[in-house]
Image: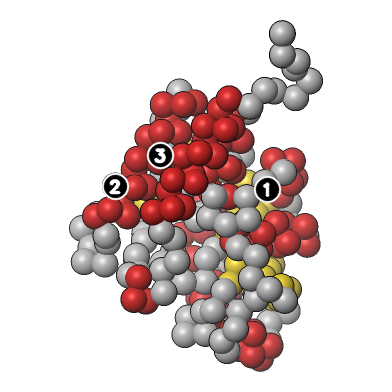
Amino acid sequence: MKLSILMPVYNEEERIADALKQALAVEYPCEIELLVVDDGSRDGTGEILGRADDARLRVITHQRNAGKGAAIRTAVANADGEYMVILDADLEYDPQDIPKLLAPVLDGRATVVYGNRTFGSHSAYSFWYVMGNKGVTMAANVLFNSYIGDLETCFKLMPVALYRSLDVRSRGFGMEAEVTGKLLRRRIRPYEVPISYRARGREEGKKITWRDGVEALWILGRERTRRKPGTTSR
């Protein structure tokens, strides 16, 4: 199996070098490629990516910022692997956890795996950020009669063909809710494994806001009420 690690990047010149180093240093149980999409960065991110030298690394550049969902859409369209996982470049997630996500796939226990952040005590956490995440996740569980622990997790591992079939259209952070809503609508329940997580604050460049939470709720409601393909209204 080959795993495509998809990394959307926007104005991360302070972290991108470390993000690449950490991702490529992991001992993966399968072949990998690291596919980075520079989503219209206007700082030194592009220059740092241009100096990176590793046969497993590919870089694609958007001329203008289009949002995380659009960057992932570009990455998925160019992925060569059978499976994919998303890894943000902000150093909040530890790529050393990716083999843990792969384990239930490689031994046949799961097809879709989510990394579940436990949100334990940490001085960098925002109360409202955590409550917002839990609220959106609860909404998904109520709407789809499921029991997942972390809808907004970046670590979503699944077959590339499955992600392509979801036809995710959200251009920004709403893609997290759209992916999960479409999976749950198909009655695909993600297998979850605990992962480590280090949240960064707004002053460190965190981009998600309360508006993204509102959008996520709207997207979940839309996906829950959308008619199945081939059905007609009476």
Identify the residue shown where x is 44% and y is 45%.
214
Mark 2 residue type: Met
Question: Would you name the residue on which mark 1 appears?
Answer: 169
Mark 1, other Cα within 10 Å: few <14 / some 14–19 / many ≥20: few
Q: Nearer the viewer, mark 3 or mark 1?
A: 1
The C terminus: image quadrant = top right
Residue 213 located left or right of residue 108: left
Tag of residue 137: 3
46 sits left or right of 101 in the view = right
Q: CA distance from mark 1 to mark 2?
A: 26 Å
Q: Nearer the viewer, residue 149 or 223?
A: 223
In the image, residue 9 sits, relative to residue 233, either above or below, namely: below
Amino acid at circle 1: Arg
The residues tagged by marks 3 and 1 sit, at their Cα atoms, a distance apart of 20 Å
Using the image, tell me which numbered label, if any, was put on residue 120.
none
Given contact means CB atoms under 8 Å apart, are the residues at marks 3 and 2 in contact? no
The correct choice, above or below, for 23 with respect to 133 in the image is below
Binning the other alpha carbons within 10 Å of mark 3 as few (below 14), some (14 to 19) or many (20 upward) gives many
Q: Position of residue 160 (x, y in %)?
A: 71, 49
- At x 44%, y 61%, the residue is 208
Task: Give coordinates of residue 64: x percent, y percent.
Answer: 68, 73
Tell me which numbered mark, 3 or 1, is placed earlier along the sequence. 3
